[in-house]
Image (cartoon, helix red, strand yellow):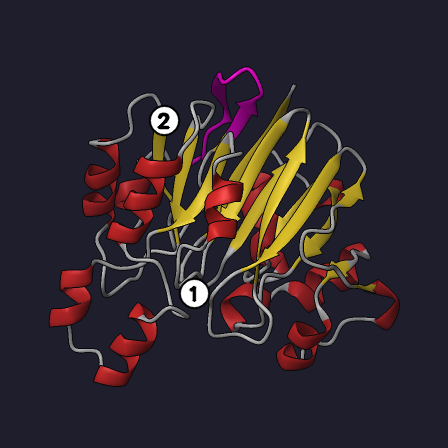
Amino acid sequence: MSLFITSLNSGSNGNCYYIGNDTEAVLIDAGLSCRETEKRMKRLGLSLANVKAIFVSHEHADHITGIPGISKKYRLPVYITAPTFQSSGIPIEKHLIESFQAEQAITIGGLTITAFPKFHDASDPHSFVVSGNGVNIGIFTDIGLVCRNLVRHFKKCHAAFLEANYCEDMLSKGNYPYFLKQRISSDHGHLSNVQALDLFVKHRSKQLTHLILAHLSKNNNVPQLVDRLFTEKAGPTRIVVASRYNETEVYEIISSGTTRVIRRQANTHTQLTLF
């Protein structure tokens, strides 16, 4: 009883997360071109033919760029709220547009996808939990504030993609203009390393086998720093730092609390060398 997960890319240059079982999968966001998404999935032994839907967290370009091409080529429904669709301006064939409501589970084959609102500077942003085969996978990025809903869903997860966007000290001392620093660190911006680590330490469950740290800032964070901070507190949970340049391995997350890597990248360098 398991699900398979990978980050195809994670960062301000594009975000796309794959969660599936043996026969079907969904993408959470699609910020890479159709061709690049196909290329990375092929390297992992995955096929877009198994993907049954795309779910959209919010309208920012790094989460939606690939949606028109992927949806059109593979005839995939796109689950997106009306405010997000209106703000995005992306061309999707009308019959492929599907809506969703917060906390209302959507069943796609053997997968159940549940959305809940998050704090971010977008029109109607949501996070997701994808469940199947007794396994819960959280996708928690682009969040400015750790709210009760996030804590409640994080506690259920066997694995999670969690934003650790910036180092507070690096952001404060960096050369970003003041308004951008304020935007990033606000309650509608992004999670810092400290905020993400606090959520992990205080609210992880015993069944959390993998924490994939996502959406790291290129200018205000360092992968090695994030890896060290979380590994020191990880215990039995495996820490993975997702890359903004390449896909992670595919991880099989098993409901019993065990896990295994089923496919490695052709590039054998560790993820920390990909930034």
Please, is residue 179 above or below residue 75 in the view? below
Q: Residue at x 21, y 53 (%)?
A: 222
Quarter of the image where one finds residue 4 = top right
The three-letter code of the residue at mark 1 reads Asn
Please, is residue 244 above or below residue 253 in the view? below
The three-letter code of the residue at mark 2 reads Thr
Please, is residue 236 above or below residue 199 in the view? above
Residue 224 spot, x, y in % from top left: 20, 44
Label 1 environment density (alpha carbons within 10 Å; few <14, some 14–19, many ≥20): some
Q: Of callouts 2 and 1, which one flags the residue occurring earlier in the amino acid sequence?
A: 1
Q: Are marks 2 and 1 in contact (CB under 8 Å)?
A: no
The magenta segment = 251-266
Instruction: Look at mark 1 in the image and give the residue it sits on.
Output: 13
Name the disc covering residue 237, or none.
2
Q: Residue at x 69, y 45 (%)?
A: 113
In the rendered structure, does residue 220 fall within the stretch colored magenta?
Answer: no
Residue 146 spot, x, y in % from top left: 40, 55
Residue 274 spot, x, y in % from top left: 31, 47
Residue 91 spot, x, y in % from top left: 73, 76
Judged from this view, the residue extending furthest toward the front is: 148
Label 2 environment density (alpha carbons within 10 Å; few <14, some 14–19, many ≥20): many
Please indicate, yes or no, whether residue 196 appears anywhere in the rendered image. yes
The one of 274 and 197 positioned closer to us in this rendering = 197
Name the disc covering residue 93, or none.
none
In the rendered structure, does residue 255 fall within the stretch colored magenta?
Answer: yes
Under tag 2, what secondary structure?
loop
Mark 2 vs mark 1, foreground winner is 2
